[in-house]
Image (spheres, grey):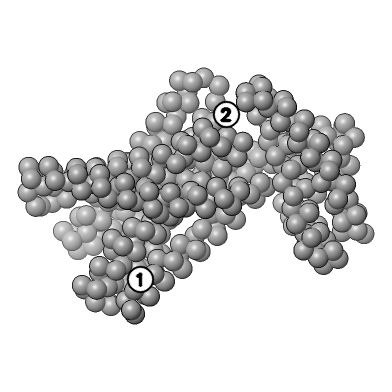
């Protein structure tokens, strides 16, 4: 029972910390919790199970033909496993891209959903394939070191790889030409496989290099994480410009005041106004402002989709619907907008 508890906590605590960090990255328009939970679930259960079954199927001929040894291990861990796992995880991303386009706005959304799928996959893989077997068979020392390595030091690996696929799908979301969408999406999938394979090669060779090859994996993995975070930052900057452009038009229409525009264009002012309203109006005021912010941001994003893609999927009607919804939310929160600045 102690082993089970340590394995669960070792997988759960770092996963929760990294999941909160990924959720925090989405500054302007939080993705629906139901879709985030569904993404995590897909990675943790269907994608993990599908990967196990396919890897068992493909590993049989690899080891029958090549025997046990470094070559077979490299082929299995550095080629077939990355291809199978990234493909299994990408199924959910492609499904979201097609079926939930209203919530899949851009590169940042792709990174968020991809990271959530990756974190779900890592949780199940770590718990069942590594932590429980190693703690049971090799003892506490080896088990705790494995938890530190896989869940903490390399804990963002699957989030990086699937987030890379998501980023390219997010880029393809606003691309005009079908062939551009296809090329970019396939390139993202291939890059994720390459990064995954590079990490696995370093880990596979660790026993032959006295652990030195793990340094290669560490550089590749954290280098990739920092690059993906830089892409997320640039995507946030672009979202900020979308909000400024989209909501400035609402000010000219008379649907928003300049004061409201200044609040909506700044994450800091949004949070400051929301928490001041909470102190004065309680949780209902806090939530009402959150819905108002969400609606205003969705309106700005949908107007950008209208500019980029035309009336694809009824963007024009959606802009009008969101304007009507924004007027309703605005009427509910205006007292808190004014008193928060007084």
Front residue of 117/241: it is 117
Front residue of 272/96: it is 96
Report whether 249 appears left or right of 228.
right
Q: Quadrant of residue 215?
A: bottom left
Give the mark toward the camera: 1 or 2.
Answer: 1
Give the residue at x 62% y 44%. 236
Mark 1: secondary structure? helix
* Residue on which the image places disc 1: 7
User: Is residue 106 visible in the rendered structure shown here?
Assistant: no
Give the residue at x 45% y 52%. 41
Residue projecting furthest to the bottom: 2
Front residue of 325/238: it is 325
Place of residue 122 in the rendered image (x, y in percent of width and height, measured from the top left): 38, 56
In whole angstroms, how far apart are the C-alphas of marks 1 and 2? Answer: 42 Å
Query: In this rendering, is residue 282 above or below 44?
Result: below
Place of residue 164 in the rendered image (x, y in percent of width and height, measured from the top left): 44, 42
Place of residue 93 in the rendered image (x, y in percent of width and height, measured from the top left): 46, 40
* Residue on which the image places disc 2: 174
Of the numbered discs 1 and 2, the one sitting upstream in the chain is 1
Give the residue at x 68% y 36%. 301
Q: Quadrant of the N terminus?
A: bottom left
Mark 2: secondary structure? loop
Report whether 87 appears left or right of 142.
right
Give the residue at x 42% y 45%. 162
Q: Quadrant of residue 127?
A: bottom left
User: Is residue 338 visible in the rendered structure shown here?
Assistant: yes
Q: Quadrant of the C terminus?
A: bottom right
């Amino acid at each position: 029972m102690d082993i089970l508890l340590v394995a669960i906590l070792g997988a759960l605590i770092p996963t929760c910390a990294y999941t909160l960090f990924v959720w925090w990255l989405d500054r302007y328009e939080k993705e629906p919790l139901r879709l985030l939970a569904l993404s995590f679930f897909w990675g943790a259960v269907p994608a993990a199970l599908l990967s196990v079954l396919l890897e068992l199927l493909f590993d049989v001929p690899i080891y029958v033909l090549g025997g046990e040894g470094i070559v077979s291990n490299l082929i299995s861990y550095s080629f077939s496993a990355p291809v199978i796992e990234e493909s299994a995880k990408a199924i959910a991303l492609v499904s979201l891209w097609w079926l939930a386009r209203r919530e899949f706005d851009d590169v940042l959304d792709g990174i968020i959903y991809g990271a959530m799928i990756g974190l779900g996959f890592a949780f199940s893989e770590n718990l069942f394939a590594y932590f429980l077997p190693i703690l049971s068979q090799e003892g506490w020392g080896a088990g705790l070191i494995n938890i530190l390595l896989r869940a903490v030091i390399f804990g963002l690996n699957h989030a990086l790889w699937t987030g890379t696929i998501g980023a390219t799908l997010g880029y393809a979301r606003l691309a005009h030409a079908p062939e551009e969408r296809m090329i970019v999406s396939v390139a993202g999938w291939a890059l994720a496989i390459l990064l995954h394979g590079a990490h696995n090669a370093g880990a596979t060779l660790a026993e032959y290099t006295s652990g030195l090859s793990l340094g290669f994996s560490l550089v590749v993995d954290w280098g990739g994480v920092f690059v993906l975070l830089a892409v997320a930052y640039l995507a946030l900057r672009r979202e900020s410009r979308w909000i400024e452009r989209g909501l400035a038009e609402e000010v000219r229409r008379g649907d928003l005041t300049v004061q409201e525009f200044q609040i909506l264009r700044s994450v800091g002012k949004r949070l400051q106004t929301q928490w001041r309203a909470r102190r004065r109006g309680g949780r209902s005021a806090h939530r009402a402002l959150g819905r108002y912010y969400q609606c205003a941001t969705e309106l700005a994003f949908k107007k950008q989709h209208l500019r980029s893609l035309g009336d694809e999927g009824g963007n024009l009607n959606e802009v009008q619907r969101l304007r009507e919804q924004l007027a309703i939310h605005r009427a509910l929160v205006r007292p808190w907008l004014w008193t928060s600045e007084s």
